[in-house]
Amino acid sequence: MDQIEEAALARLIPAFYDRVRADPHIGPLFDDAVDHWPAHLEKLIAFWSSVMLTTGRYKGSPVTAHLKHKARITPAMFDRWLVIWSATTDELMPPDAAVALQAKAARIAESLRLALFFRLDDPGRGRPEASLHSSIKG
């Protein structure tokens, strides 16, 4: 994508995670999970470089990383993460780049949500429709 470049990601990712860390709903989880923020931010920049620019810089497994914290993660936390991501990308990136980053983030969040919460014996669990229905009923 022409409007997304390494330098833009290097500005976006730290700004985004500053907002995540300040968020009362998901910030504590991130602060507890990350021991060394500068190194983690570099890893996240490499991740986004890999997924958006196909650089191959990221070496790791997002599912494995999130599984370590499964006991504290809820499906709603992915929604909150996406809200902050959308606001930050809208503010800091050109419109086409923001839309592309938001679409990719939504697919990644859904994949992680399914990896963490989907069970064959409970097919509705982990799907956005299931949480939407339960929030409407509740």
Image (cartoon, rainbow, N blue to C red):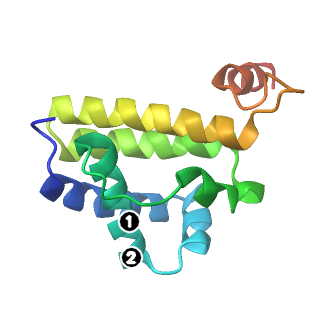
Residue at the outermost right position: 121
Residue 87 coordinates in the image, percent (x, y): 34, 41
Residue at the outermost left position: 2
* Disc 2: CA contacts within 10 A as few (<14), some (14-19) or many (>=20): few
Quarter-of-image position of residue 39: bottom left
Quarter-of-image position of residue 90: top left
Which residue matches tag 2? Answer: 39
Cα distance in 3D space between marks 1 and 2: 6 Å
59 lies left or right of 42? right
Image position of 105 with respect to 11: above or below: above
Residue 12 is marked as none
Residue at the outermost bottom position: 36
Residue 93 coordinates in the image, percent (x, y): 18, 43
What residue do we see at 53% from left, 55% from top? 61
Which residue matches tag 1? Answer: 43
The secondary structure type at the circle numbered 2 is helix
Q: Which of 115 and 17 is in front in this view?
A: 115
The three-letter code of the residue at mark 1 reads Lys
Question: How many numbered dots are placed on residues in this image?
Answer: 2
112 lies left or right of 5? right
* Disc 1: CA contacts within 10 A as few (<14), some (14-19) or many (>=20): some
48 lies left or right of 131? left
Q: In which quarter of the image is the N terminus?
A: top left
98 lies left or right of 105? left
The answer to the question of whether label 1 and label 2 lie on touching residues, with beta carbons closer than 8 A, is yes
Q: Is residue 20 visible?
A: yes
The three-letter code of the residue at mark 2 reads Ala
Image position of 35 with respect to 68: above or below: below
Q: Which of 23 and 4 is in front in this view?
A: 4
Image position of 103 with respect to 116: above or below: above
What residue do we see at 73% from left, 55% from top? 70
